[in-house]
Image (cartoon, rainbow, N blue to C red):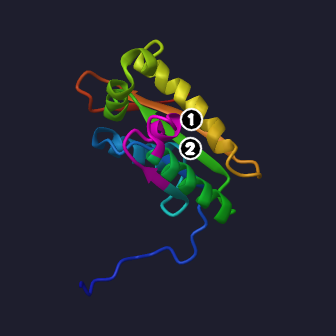
């Protein structure tokens, strides 16, 4: 056991839950976007980062365990932390979880159009799921991240 201490937020009252993919290629950009563009400081939001981000909430039959865990976790936070007034959903291009999901489901069932079109459709679908988890009104915002240059060193976020 270590004797070093670490700072904690004594009375956090998060304003939002942010669901995003843990893909390390997008992680720095995502955390910067959350603080700089969305204006949330640490402690003001609950980060829910998992493979594919919202993918688990978009496929309840293909990913039943993932769906159950994410849905129940999201619902728990919304019901037990009244300070949360919004849910922010972030998806990104070239998502490996979506690629794996496509292999599992088969290309025709997974993709109606392009992978990006599927992700935009899922962002809308998951926004409805999140909105219906609690009786009180919450705001749901959706974003899609994509590389802004050929070197893949810059990322841009657009409202979805």
Q: Quadrant of the N terminus?
A: bottom left
Residue displayed at 53% across by 78% down: 10
Residue 100 visible, this orientation: yes
Q: Quadrant of residue 92?
A: top left
Residue 48 shown in magenta: yes
Q: CA distance from mark 2 to mark 1?
A: 6 Å
Horizontal side of residue 141 vs 5, given as left or right: right
- Image x and y of residue 42, in percent: 48, 61
Tell me the SS state at disc 2.
Answer: strand
Seen from this angle, which residue lies furthest bottom? 3
Residue 10 shown in magenta: no
**CA neighbours of label 2 inside 10 A, class few (<14), some (14 to 19), many (20+):** many
From this view, report whether residue 3 is shown above or below residue 145. Answer: below
**CA neighbours of label 1 inside 10 A, class few (<14), some (14 to 19), many (20+):** many
Tell me the SS state at disc 1.
Answer: strand
- Image x and y of residue 85, in percent: 68, 53
Residue displayed at 36% across by 77% down: 6
Residue 81 visible, this orientation: no
Q: Which residue is mark 2?
A: 88
Q: Which residue is mark 1?
A: 142
Q: Quadrant of the C terminus?
A: top right
Counting residues from the start of the chain, the first of labels 2 and 1 encountered is 2
In the image, 156 versus 104, the foreground residue is 104
Residue displayed at 22% across by 26% down: 151
Horizontal side of residue 121 vs 3, given as left or right: right
- Image x and y of residue 134, in percent: 71, 52
Asked if disc 2 and disc 1 are in contact, CB closer than 8 Å, the reply is yes
- Image x and y of residue 75, in percent: 61, 55
Residue displayed at 63% across by 40% down: 129
> Which residues make up the magenta segment?
47-64
């Amino acid at each position: 056991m270590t004797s070093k201490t670490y700072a904690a937020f004594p009375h956090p009252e998060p304003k939002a839950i942010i669901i995003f993919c843990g893909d390390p290629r997008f992680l720095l950009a995502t955390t910067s976007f959350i603080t700089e563009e969305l204006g949330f400081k640490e402690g003001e939001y609950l980060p829910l980062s998992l493979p594919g981000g919202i993918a688990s909430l978009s496929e309840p039959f293909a990913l039943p365990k993932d769906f159950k865990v994410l849905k129940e976790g999201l619902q728990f936070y919304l019901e037990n932390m009244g300070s949360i007034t919004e849910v922010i959903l972030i998806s990104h291009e070239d998502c490996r979880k979506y690629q794996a999901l496509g292999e599992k489901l088969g290309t025709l069932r997974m993709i109606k159009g392009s992978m990006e079109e599927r992700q935009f459709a899922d962002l809308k679908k998951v926004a409805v799921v999140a909105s219906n988890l609690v009786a009180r009104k919450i705001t749901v915002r959706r974003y899609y991240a994509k590389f802004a240059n050929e070197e893949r060193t810059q990322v841009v976020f657009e409202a979805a």
